[in-house]
Amino acid sequence: MNTQHTPGPWEAQTNRSPLTITHELPHLPQAKGGHRQFREIAEVYVSDKGDGAPEDFANARLIAAAPELLAALENLLSRAALPGPARKNAVLRERMISAREQARAAIAKATGGTQ
């Protein structure tokens, strides 16, 4: 993979508003007071639903997992040859082909390319 995005891991900072997705910059010296330095990747604004906005926290966690999800999907796709039973079973073969197409489409959406 030719990574063009900020590499993972990303972390969801859910103790402030807006919820912030960050990447630690370990190569930089610690800031004054010994604080680690981070790059902000995204912000998720908490909605006014009055229920603690669990959906917003889930969105922040999903965004923070994006680099690992992309890497895992690419790894799975690279190993997703049709197993022996799938070659003989038309339904299983179609499901595997569909899953591989979905994986390629998701990777293309995430990377801005085609697979």
Image: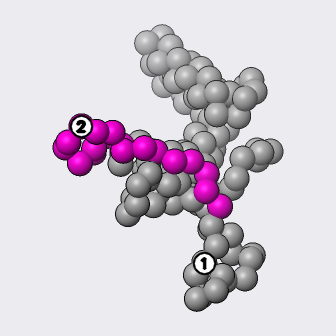
Is residue 50 found left or right of 46 in the rendered image?
A: left
> What residue do we see at 38% from left, 63% from top?
15
Which residue bears the numbered disc 2? 49
Which residue bears the numbered disc 1? 36
> What residue do we see at 72% from left, 82% from top?
29
Identify residue type, mark 2. Answer: Lys
Give the structural element (helix, strand or loop) at label 2.
loop
- The residue carrying pointer 2 sits among few (fewer than 14), some (14 to 19) or many (20 or more) residues within 10 Å by Cα, namely few
Q: Is residue 44 magenta?
A: yes
Q: Is residue 39 above or below residue 88?
A: below
Q: Quadrant of the C terminus?
A: top right
Q: Position of residue 60 (x, y in %)?
A: 44, 48
Quadrant of residue 105 within the rendered picture: top right
Q: Position of residue 26 (x, y in %)?
A: 68, 75
Using the image as rendered, state which of residue 25 and residue 107 is in the foreground: 25
The stretch in magenta equals: 39-56
Is residue 26 found left or right of 66 in the rendered image?
A: right
Mark 2 / mark 1, whichever is N-terminal? 1
Q: Residue furthest right?
A: 2
